[in-house]
């Protein structure tokens, strides 16, 4: 446990960010899973939107998001 006040604050802030990041990543994974089950165009749009929002928040790297979306397109076409 940190003794310095600023270190205590950093612990709290990092816990909040960690929780938010996990929630967003989990939402993306859930959306991908739904797309794998349904495979509809509407679900594809929702999944790519969720990925783009995660990129905008800085949770997923831009190149990783593009890779995921490319794989989704292959999955939907198949």
Image: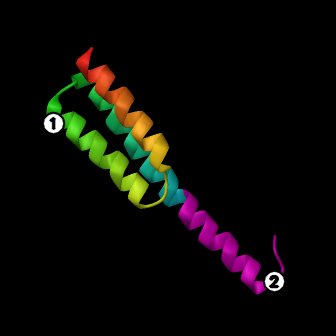
Q: What range is drawn magenta here?
A: 1-18
- The nearer-to-camera label among 1 and 2 is 1
The residue where tag 2 is placed is 4
Q: Residue furthest bottom?
A: 5
Dot 2: few (<14), some (14–19), or many (≥20) neighbours within 10 Å? few
From the viewer's perspective, tell me whether residue 9 is left or right of residue 19.
right
Asked if the residues shown at circle 1 and circle 2 are in contact, with their CB atoms under 8 angstroms apart, the answer is no
Numbered marks: total = 2
Q: Quadrant of the N terminus?
A: bottom right
The residue where tag 1 is placed is 42
Mark number, residue 21: none
How far from the left and from the top, in percent, is residue 39? 22, 24
How far from the left and from the top, in percent, is residue 47? 29, 40
Closer-to-camera residue (27/53): 53
Dot 1: few (<14), some (14–19), or many (≥20) neighbours within 10 Å? few
- The CA distance from mark 1 to mark 2 is 50 Å
From the viewer's perspective, tell me whether residue 35 is left or right of residue 66.
left
How far from the left and from the top, in percent, is residue 48? 29, 42
Task: Label 2: state its secondary structure.
Answer: loop
Vertical comparison of 71 with 5: above or below: above
Q: Residue at x 23, y 35 (%)?
A: 44
Q: Residue at x 73, y 83 (%)?
A: 6
From the viewer's perspective, tell me whether residue 55 is left or right of residue 44.
right
How far from the left and from the top, in percent, is residue 38? 22, 24
Task: Label 1: state its secondary structure.
Answer: helix
């Amino acid at each position: 446990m940190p003794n310095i006040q600023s270190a205590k604050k950093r612990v709290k802030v990092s816990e909040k960010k960690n929780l938010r990041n996990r929630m967003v990543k989990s939402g993306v994974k859930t959306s991908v899973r739904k797309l794998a089950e349904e495979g509809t165009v509407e679900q594809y749009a929702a999944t790519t939107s969720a990925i783009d929002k995660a990129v905008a928040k800085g949770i997923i790297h831009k190149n990783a998001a593009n890779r995921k979306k490319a794989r989704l397109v292959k999955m939907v076409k198949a």
